[in-house]
Amino acid sequence: MSNSPAPTVSVIMPSYNHAKYVASAISSILNQTFSDFELIVVDDGSADDSAEIIRTFEDPRIRTMFFEKNKGAAAATNKAISLARGNYIALCNSDDRWVQNKLDVQLSILKKQPELVATFSDVTWIDDQGVPLDKSQLSFSTKLFRRKNRSRHEWLHDLILYGNCLCHPSIMIKRDSLNRTGPYDDRFRQLPDFQKWVALVQFGEIFVSPEQLVEFRIHDSNTSAVKPDTSRRDANEFRLIIRSAFFNMSAENFSASFGLKSPPLVSDENLKIEKALFLLSHKGRFEHVFREAGLDLMHGILASAEARLLLSSKYDYDINSFYSDMGASSPWVDDTGFSVGGKVNLTTVPTRRLAGQILRRGLKFLESQTRLPK
């Protein structure tokens, strides 16, 4: 632990296999117009020359740690946070850059608006060589992180219904607020930051600056690059985050963010019913994710005779309504009736069990035809 006075800001930088970019990232922090900060770089077991490049910097504000083996970005970020001493924490990815006055701008925002727990910003998109990209060179909107400000309940509503729109390497957050959200969950690779924002706006107000304070680099090895495995992982992580958020959301946050179908709330069971009915009735981009969570929640609710009575009397919903919802759609069967993972049309067989038997027999037959002679 350093014996020097605690800095105002702790800048954390998880680094992994960014030898081509990490020096530029570090330099953009050391050249900030605001200088009362520490920079904590945690190299996550890089297999390239990243560690050697990081060691070439001798600025006394830099503190470093080097993992022998790769543990993942969340683990490296959590380690850096655990070493932070500043009252404010900012994050920079080791392949991005900051504009020179980023810290000054964001500190001013947080000090002028003490009710805020964190601030974010818009970005400039740059290529592998650090050259700004224009709209024609991007497969997504340049307005991805350019958002109008709103209340925390509006942020909670929009994040959950439309997905992440806050730029992780643009954040400056009060340390006690970051600690209140808990550590980054290393079970998530694509969306640990999204989970963090959903938790954050459930207790604190945030602000997005229209200034482009980060130069966000687009290159082939971006963690968020669209590939089959990252797309599937993104969908699976989103599903888990949404389920947890809804199942654990307080009555105040749920009612203020999503409204109530039949107020007032009379019990905890009533809150679960409201959540389940919202999830089951939602239409939009993620409705299959919402419906699956709603079915699971309603399934548990219906185990209680008291809850069934409340559902029937207050919402006109009964066991037949649940049967109908269970039959409305399934993530395991596409709209044509074909089973996901096998081209067996479930509408032409009497039961799913029979469909399974047909699949197993077909696989057994194919195996017998392709088995090599002993």
Image (spheres, rainbow, N blue to C red):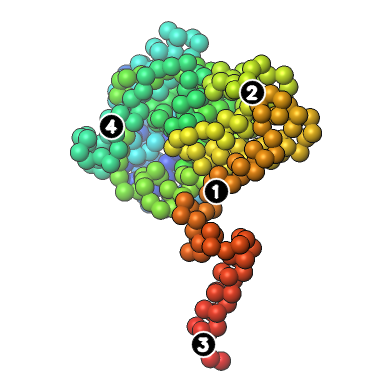
- Name the residue tied to disc 4: 142
- In primary-sequence order, the first of circles 2 and 1 is 2
Q: Give the mark toward the camera: 4 or 1.
A: 1
Find the distance from the CA under tag 4 to the CA under tag 2: 34 Å
Find the distance from the CA under tag 2 to the CA under tag 1: 28 Å
Q: Is residue 334 above or below residue 302?
A: below
Farthest top residue in view: 112
Q: Give the mark toward the camera: 2 or 1.
A: 1
Find the distance from the CA under tag 4 to the CA under tag 3: 56 Å
Label disc, if present, on residue 372 of the rendered structure: 3
* Residue lying at 50% horizontally and 38% vertically, measured from the top left: 287
Tell me the kind of residue under disc 1: Ser
**Pointer 1: residues within 10 angstroms few (<14), some, or many (20+)?**
some
- Name the residue tied to disc 2: 250
- In primary-sequence order, the first of circles 1 and 3 is 1
- In primary-sequence order, the first of circles 4 and 2 is 4
Q: Secondary structure at mark 2?
A: loop
Q: The N terminus lies in which quarter of the figure? A: top right
* Residue lying at 72% horizontally and 19% vertically, measured from the top left: 266
Find the distance from the CA under tag 2 to the CA under tag 3: 60 Å
Judge whether residue 267 can be spotted in this image. yes
- Name the residue tied to disc 1: 330
Q: Secondary structure at mark 1?
A: loop
Q: Quadrant of residue 137?
A: top left
Cβ atoms at labels 4 and 3 below 8 Å apart:
no
Q: Secondary structure at mark 4?
A: loop
**Pointer 4: residues within 10 angstroms few (<14), some, or many (20+)?**
some
